[in-house]
Amino acid sequence: MKKNSRTIRFLKGEKIFLTLIILLGVLSPIVTVASKAILSRSNIDVERMKKKVEKQKNINESLEMQVNELASLSSIQDIAKEYGLSYINDNIIVIK
């Protein structure tokens, strides 16, 4: 007994089309995972940068408070007395 063996023959265009479909089926999950990994890393970097910015804001606020304390009238008068200087209000120029 002979078995009927049927072979499926594809045209050249059909072979290319099937190859492209298989290739897309394999590559699409890989590309999706890779893009999500890149997005995740970007989000992590953004959060790190936000923390650095917040930390620098706090440092800037602290330094601004120190400048305001040093620029206060009583502080200026104390420093002037310490160095034997006189405090004349008309000679003070405020720069902003």
Image (cartoon, rainbow, N blue to C red):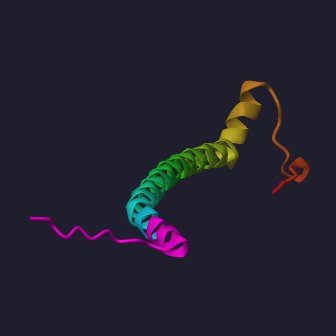
Specify the farthest residue to the top: 83
Where residue 55 sits: x, y (%)? 51, 46
Residue 84 position (above or below residue 37): above
Asked if the magenta segment contains residue 12, the reply would be yes
Residue drawn at x 48%, y 75% as measured from the top left: 14
The x and y percentages for residue 39 are 47, 58
Front residue of this view, candidates 34 and 75: 34
Residue 10 figure quarter: bottom left
Image x and y of residue 22, in percent:
41, 65
Quarter of the image with the C terminus is: bottom right
Q: Which residues are magenta?
A: 1-20
Q: What residue is rendered at 42% in x and 53% in y? A: 37
Compared across the picture, whether 22 is left or right of 63 comes to left
Count of numbered circles on the image: 0
| Residue at image coords 63%, 49% | 64
Outermost residue toward the front? 1
Q: x, y percentage for residue 89?
A: 84, 51
Q: Is residue 91 left or right of residue 80?
A: right
Which residue shows up at 41% across the image and 56% down it?
Answer: 30
Judge whether 20 appears above or below 52 on screen.
below
Q: Furthest-right residue in view?
A: 91
Say which of 21 and 3 sits in front.
3
Q: Please state which of residues 50 and 84 is positioned toward the viewer in this rendering.
A: 50
Magenta span includes 26: no
The quarter of the picture where the N terminus appears is: bottom left
